[in-house]
Amino acid sequence: MLKSRRQLKILEIVRDEIVETQEELARRLGEEGISVTQATISRDIKELQLIKVPVGDGRYRYALREESAPLGPSDRFRRLFRECCVGIDHSENIVVVKCLTGTASTAGEAIDGLRWREVVGTVAGDNTVIVVVKPKEATLGTVLKLKELLE
């Protein structure tokens, strides 16, 4: 479980901040109470498929891989989603994904990354993700696809 929580924190840090080096990422994790070695950071970056993107002035930062085509859920996403999701429910065209405290923003971003045509977008709090579905008739199918990720 420690690895998954560490990797969720890495995704959060990389999404919210400009991180240029592995050492900087290790320092930020340390500030969050997560002690790691450079080798561990390197493996996590590879497993999470982080890439370096330009930020200007010849500098680069770590970022999540962006794909233009719809994505299927990777094994890594399935595992992270399984470990942070504690329940899924719906009403009308809204799906509510309950998560462990502090993991909802990562789960929401991952759901957005799936680029399912029927998902208009997500809004994440600390432990809840709201998934807006259009058309309303696609809601149950979306719930079922999300629940399949938990298997």
Image (spheres, rainbow, N blue to C red):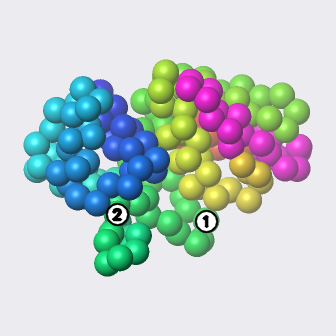
**Amino acid type, mark 2:** Arg
Please determine whether, in this image, residue 24 is positioned above or below residue 99: below
129 in magenta: yes
| Quadrant of the rendered image containing residue 42 | bottom left
Q: Measure how far apart labels 1 and 2 are at the Cα level.
A: 24 Å
Q: Earlier in the sequence, mark 1 or mark 2?
A: 2
Q: Is residue 122 left or right of residue 5?
A: right
According to the image, label 1 marks what residue? 70
Image coordinates of residue 16 in percent, x first then y, are 46, 47
Element type where label 1 sits in the image: loop
| Marks 1 & 2, CB-CB < 8 Å contact | no
Q: Residue at x 41, y 50 (%)?
A: 17
The foreground one among 6 and 72 is 6
Q: Residue at x 59, y 71 (%)?
A: 69
Range covered by the magenta-colored residues: 122-141
Image coordinates of residue 20 in percent, x first then y, are 28, 60
According to the image, label 2 marks what residue? 61
Which label belongs to residue 116? Answer: none
Please determine whether, in this image, residue 118 is positioned above or below residue 3: below
The foreground one among 89 and 24 is 24
Q: Residue at x 20, y 54 (%)?
A: 22
Image coordinates of residue 132 in percent, x first then y, are 77, 42
Mark 1 or 2: the one toward you: 2
Q: Is residue 116 left or right of residue 50?
A: right
The foreground one among 71 and 37 is 37
Q: Residue at x 50, y 40 (%)?
A: 106
* Count of picture labels: 2
Image coordinates of residue 97 in percent, x first then y, are 64, 30
**Amino acid type, mark 1:** Pro
Q: If the image is split into quadrants, where does the N terminus sit?
A: top left
